[in-house]
Amino acid sequence: MSHYLYLVRHGEHQDAEHGLRDGKLSERGKRQATLVADRLGGVPFDGVYHSPLDAPSETAAFLAQRLPSIQPEPSTLLFDCIPSGPTPDMPHAYHGWYGGVTEEEIVAGQAQMGDAVAEWFTPARDDRHDLLITHNAVIGWFVREAFQAPEWRWMGTNVAHTALTIIRIRSAKPAEVVTLNDLAHLPVELRTGLPVDQPV
């Protein structure tokens, strides 16, 4: 049997282009949330969880409006965080990113992601489908976990606002990434949140 994790980054929030990490959804973010809800309409979700911050909470509320059978629950395991600190095998180019990050933030992020993996990277007796609405760093860490890649590799994973990533967890085989940063439900003008523009 398979445990499927449907990972969705929150919709674009107001002033996201100015570097703010959270806030109410922009008009584009609301449209993104509506479209990903329509995309997921046929999935028989067993659980729906979201980060308690504003953008993922509002994204979850939009999904619940379109999918009345789901009941999203906040989870502090899905907070935005710094999942790991600098390591000896990390490329030098990444080290500067940690300039304003405290040791306390790193320790808290490591503990949070350890608990999140223990919570959701578990096989199921029957097929199970869980939707997690969260942040880029958390999705990057889950993808890194599926690949069993070095800790720093979460930093090289970027997903767009309301992009869909699916991970499949089984008892007898390694986890697999079914799809990563799937944007099929979004027109080009709504593909926001990536570090580079997408081709038209």
Image (cartoon, rainbow, N blue to C red):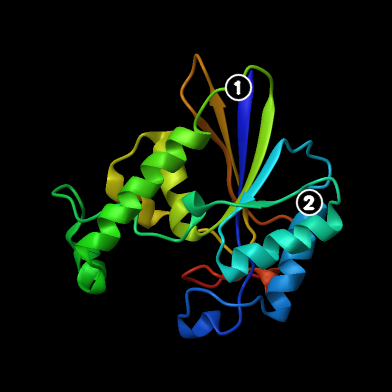
Tag 1 residue: 124
**Residue 198's x, y, as percent?**
58, 68
Q: Image quadrant of residue 123?
A: top right
Q: Secondary structure at mark 2?
A: helix
Q: How many tags in the picture?
A: 2
Neighbours of disc 2 within 10 Å: few (<14), some (14-19), many (20+): some
Dot 1: element: loop
52 lies left or right of 174: right
Disc 1 marks a residue whose amino acid type is Ala
Task: Give the camera-side residue of 92 and 122.
Answer: 122
Residue at x 49%, y 35% (from the top left corner) = 119
Residue at position x 57%, y 77% from top?
A: 23
Q: Nearer the viewer, residue 6 or 159?
A: 6
Q: Whole-percent x and y of residue 39?
A: 78, 51
Q: Which residue is mark 2?
A: 39
Left or right: 71 as drawn, with respect to 136: right
Q: Residue at x 40, y 38 (%)?
A: 145
Q: Residues within 10 Å of mark 1 (few under 14, many from 20)?
A: some
